Image (spheres, rainbow, N blue to C red):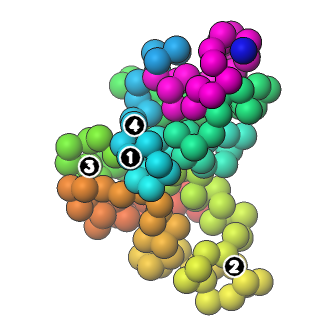
Amino acid sequence: MRTTLTVNGKDHSLDADPRTSLLDALRNHLNLTGTKKGCDHGQCGACTVMINGRRINSCLSLACMHDGDEITTIEGLGDEHNLSDMQQNFVKHDGFQCGYCTPGQICSATAMLEEFKAGWPSNVSGSLTASPELTDAEISERMSGNICRCAAYPNIVDAIRETAEEKS
């Protein structure tokens, strides 16, 4: 099936089986290997990317469903010469150990801060109508779909908090 994927601002024509997951299209067809395959069941978050600014588990979505969508991967957030604020703060706060989950964590955290800024409540928000406060519990709940097997969670929370404070 011919699909055009807009990834990190560039159009890519893809001829792949319609059952190809977005994760496999990114990694195997477009050679964008920053997005990681962890569980392949949507349980770990290693494959998190952003579609039109919202985070998704790319292992659970078919590539052909995203013809015309704007897909952002870790490669689209920054590079070694120009890191995003979130990437810089992950480095500063040592928000990674082995690094396997880091691309998904950073994509998820980037989109999560936009959700927070828009006033979206989470399961631990005190109110459905009032603007939530960015507490450690709030960050942890919002990032609960991203697992770090090395347990770098306190440093990940610190990196997210600093990024949020810089943007406010």
Q: Please state if 62 lies on the left or on the right of 79 as rendered.
A: right
Q: Pointers 3 and 1 in contact (CB under 8 A)?
A: no
Query: In the rendered image, which residue does mark 4 sit on?
Result: 37
Which residue type does callout 3 highlight?
Phe
Q: Could you tell me which secondary element the residue under label 1 belongs to? A: loop
Q: Residue 96, labelled with which disc?
A: 3
Dot 2 lies on which element?
loop
In the image shown, does 5 or 60 lie closer to the viewer? 60
Inspect the image, locate mark 1, and give the three-letter code of the amino acid beneath it.
Cys
Residue 131: which disc? 2
Q: Position of residue 48 (x, y in %)?
A: 50, 44
Residues 66 and 110: in front is 66
Rendered residue at 59%/80% (across/down): 123
In x, y percent, where is residue 113?
A: 58, 58
**Callout 2 environment at 10 Å: few (<14), some (14 to 19), or many (20+)?**
some
Q: Do we see residue 133 in this rendering?
A: yes
Badge nearest the viewer, 1 or 2: 1
How many numbered marks have been drawn onto this rendered protein structure? 4
Q: Marks 4/1: CA distance? A: 6 Å
x and y, in percent, of residue 45 in the image: 45, 50
Q: Quadrant of residue 25?
A: top right
Q: Which residues are magenta?
A: 2-27
Mark closest to the chain's N terminus, 3 or 1: 1
Nearer mark to the viewer, of 4 and 2: 4
Mark 1 Cα shell of 10 Å, populated few (<14), some (14-19), many (≥20): few
Q: Is residue 51 magenta?
A: no
Q: Nearer the viewer, mark 2 or mark 3?
A: 3
In the image: residue 93, left or right of residue 12: left
Q: Are marks 2 and 3 in contact (CB under 8 Å)?
A: no
